[in-house]
Image (cartoon, rainbow, N blue to C red):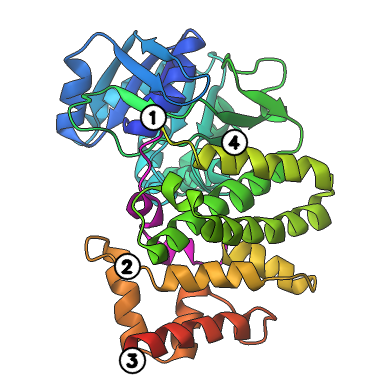
Amino acid sequence: MKAVHFGAGNIGRGFVGLLLHEGGYEVVFSDVAGPLVDAINAVSEYTVHEVGEGGRDHVVTGFRAINSAEHPDQVIEEVAGANVVTTAVGPTILRFVAPHLVAGLALRDPSSPPLQIMACENAINATDLLRDEMVEAAGEAWAALEQRAVFANTAVDRIVPEQPAGAGVDVTVEPFFEWAIERHPFGDDPPAIPGAHFVDDLAPYIERKLFTVNTGHAATAYFGAQAGVERIADALADPATAARVAAALEETSAVLIAKHEFAPEELAEYRATILARFANPALPDHVRRVARQPLRKLSRNERFVGPAAEAAERGLSVEALVAAMGAALAFDDPDDPQAVELQAMLREQDADAVTAAVTGLERSHPLYARVRDAVAARQAALAG
């Protein structure tokens, strides 16, 4: 069995690639970073180091890498003969992956089982997005190709921090992981991925993860940046910061309970697990890494505005989530282009313009005025 994985970075090697290896797949990594591809091909094995309670080392073998920028024909050929394709490249990069997949499907033996495609991204229904990009790339040819692939959305969760200097292609991760996959697209032939679980309705899992893990991680980073700490674990070691993060997650849990009918005690236990993961002192996870790209994290369907908008529409509390947005608006890192752009917007545009452009909220939305006030407060601090 063979799996082609797009994105040979830390998540690709330390999470998706590891589980594919443990499922018995030969793993072909595809990436545009030439030095990384060369480093992967220079070794016959690498180690995934789990740090923290219950952690252990996993040795990965049976892999190789292709530079898709220099050898797209090789990637296409591998896709044509693969059983599984996965991605961990970021939602905005999927449009560049799509043409390779379309070309691979065109070369695929029509009598072969359908190629099983899963986009493992921090986005809701990312596989649907990838499929849409493939349909657009294929044009009129899609009708002849669509039966050669099946598409399943997934929800993935594992903290993979910045890696220590000199680690090579080894990867340090937390022990916890979750990979939930839609069951129905595969029929009676699901992919062999140990540790993954297949579910009939993925939406609650995706939103539980996005509104708890992603919201909580980012809130910890932005509140931690305000407090002047460097590591995520140190941010949560401060009782005041921990209380602000916990309050934000209580608000997102209220949305999940109202929308998906999760049991309150189940979500309370889930929140406690997530916060314990963030507080893992053995994990070298840094505030600046998690806080980067604030414009994306403050956008309409992301981890703050998304759940806060739904909470406001239901008349639920949003105070803690708006406070987290205020902390995100204050994130000022000269090495992060999005942070630089956000601070420039705050200095150069009025509060309404910034609120609309960054959050995508309409003025009539019940959350709008609260966020606009947070924007105005940040502008006042910059002016002072």
Q: Above or below — where is 20 with respect to 375? A: above
Residue at 38% in and 29% down: 12
Crowdedness near tag 3: few (<14), some (14–19) or many (≥20) residues, C-alpha within 10 Å: few
Residue 205's spot in the image, x, y percent?
Answer: 68, 41
Q: Which residue was labeled with disc 4?
A: 154
In the rendered structure, the answer to whether residue 347 lies left or right of residue 119 reads left
Most foreground residue, 204 or 87: 204
Dot 4: what SS? strand
Q: Which residue was labeled with disc 2?
A: 339
Q: Which residue was labeled with disc 3?
A: 384
Crowdedness near tag 4: few (<14), some (14–19) or many (≥20) residues, C-alpha within 10 Å: many
On whether residue 290 falls in the magenta region, the answer is: yes
Q: Which kind of residue does numbered mark 4 sit on?
A: Thr
Residue at 76% in and 32% down: 200
From mark 1 to mark 3, how far is it between C-alphas?
A: 44 Å
Q: Above or below — where is 128 with respect to 59? A: below
Residue 77's spot in the image, x, y percent?
Answer: 32, 21
Q: Which kind of residue does numbered mark 1 sit on?
A: Gly
Residues in magenta?
283-301
Residue 276's spot in the image, x, y percent?
Answer: 57, 39
N-term-proximal mark, 2 vs 4: 4
Dot 2: what SS? helix
On whether residue 159 falls in the magenta region, the answer is: no
Crowdedness near tag 1: few (<14), some (14–19) or many (≥20) residues, C-alpha within 10 Å: many
Residue at 55% in and 86% down: 373
Most foreground residue, 8 or 314: 314
From mark 4 to mark 1, how far is it between C-alphas?
A: 15 Å
Q: Quadrant of the C terminus?
A: bottom left
